[in-house]
Image (cartoon, coloured by chain):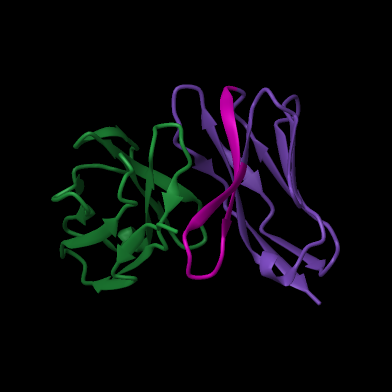
Chain colours: A green, B purple
């Protein structure tokens, strides 16, 4: 069964560094999403992406964040100048249609020290 | 704004029924969801209900929606050890398909 994959599973970075979290969505899906979950808190929506542009974003998704689909398979989340409070589990998801089920990846745990 | 609340833990004996409860605040919700997260895995959509329905059954799963009280529940019949996971309630509101999640309920199934 096709699945969303994410790499790395765990990323440790120093405060102020840039990180790129990678996702490979399900191949025929058109809608892509990033969510995050700070430890002990709720899963929060960051951004959705369709047709090579951001379709919706939350207040969390400020200028520090950017997304890209650099080729036909990868979907990336870049976090510039990481802060301690960016430490969280980041989930990628993809869907075939806007109102269809979103399939989630296993997540990347980001630790900022 | 949207807010989804659920209890953090539920412990049941194998073979019993589990009922996980959730409350939400936004009356304009269109879809209400239950997701399951097993250790080391992503969130898996278990089932969802449209806001004009009050019940949905899918094998061992029964979703009940009380729109007046803004209360959603997930009942798992004949709970098995493989059902041990975190269960997230979520809602999406009119005009968006982006779910707003609760904190998740850890279901622990013991023999």
The residue that appears at 53% across and 70% down in the rendered structure is: B39
As drawn, which residue projects farthest toward the front? A1
Seen from the viewer's position, the closer of residues A78 and B78 is B78
Q: Which residues are magenta?
A: B28-47
As drawn, which residue projects farthest toward the bottom? B111
Percent coordinates x, y for residue A89 in the rendering: 39, 62
Looking at the picture, does residue B79 appear above or below residue A59?
Answer: below
Percent coordinates x, y for residue A14 in the rendering: 21, 71
Looking at the picture, does residue B108 appear above or below residue A54?
Answer: below
Does the magenta stretch mainly form a helix, a strand or a loop?
Answer: strand
The residue that appears at 45% across and 22% down in the rendered structure is: B95
Q: Is residue B45 visible?
A: yes
Whether residue A41 is in magenta: the answer is: no
Horizontally, residue B97 falls left or right of residue A80, namely right
| Quadrant including the C terminus of chain B | bottom right
Horizontally, residue B78 falls left or right of residue B56, namely right
Percent coordinates x, y for residue B101 in the rendering: 53, 45
Seen from the viewer's position, the closer of residues A25 and B72 is A25
The residue that appears at 64% across and 26% down in the rendered structure is: B51
Res A7 quadrant in image: bottom left
The residue that appears at 37% across and 57% down in the rendered structure is: A4
Q: Is residue A113 visible?
A: no
């Amino acid at each position: 069964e096709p699945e969303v994959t994410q790499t790395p599973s765990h990323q440790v970075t120093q405060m102020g560094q840039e990180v790129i979290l990678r996702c490979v969505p399900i191949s025929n899906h058109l809608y892509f999403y990033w969510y995050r979950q700070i430890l002990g808190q709720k899963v929060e929506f960051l951004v959705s992406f369709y047709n090579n542009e951001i379709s919706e974003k939350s207040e969390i998704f400020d200028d520090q964040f950017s997304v890209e689909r650099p080729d036909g398979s990868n979907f990336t989340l870049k976090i510039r100048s990481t802060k301690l409070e960016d430490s969280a589990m980041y989930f990628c998801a993809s869907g075939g249609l806007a109102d269809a089920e979103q399939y989630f990846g296993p997540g990347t745990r980001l630790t900022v020290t | 704004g949207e807010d989804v609340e659920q209890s953090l833990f539920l412990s049941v004996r194998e073979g019993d029924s589990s009922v996980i409860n959730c409350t939400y605040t936004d009356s304009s919700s269109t879809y209400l969801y239950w997701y399951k997260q097993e250790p080391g895995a992503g969130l898996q959509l278990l089932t969802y209900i449209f806001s004009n329905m009050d019940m949905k059954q899918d094998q061992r799963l029964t979703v009940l929606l009380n729109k007046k009280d803004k209360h959603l529940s997930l009942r798992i019949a004949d709970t098995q050890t493989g059902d041990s996971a975190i269960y997230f309630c979520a809602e999406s509101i009119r005009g968006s398909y982006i779910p707003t999640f609760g904190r998740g309920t850890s279901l622990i199934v013991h023999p």
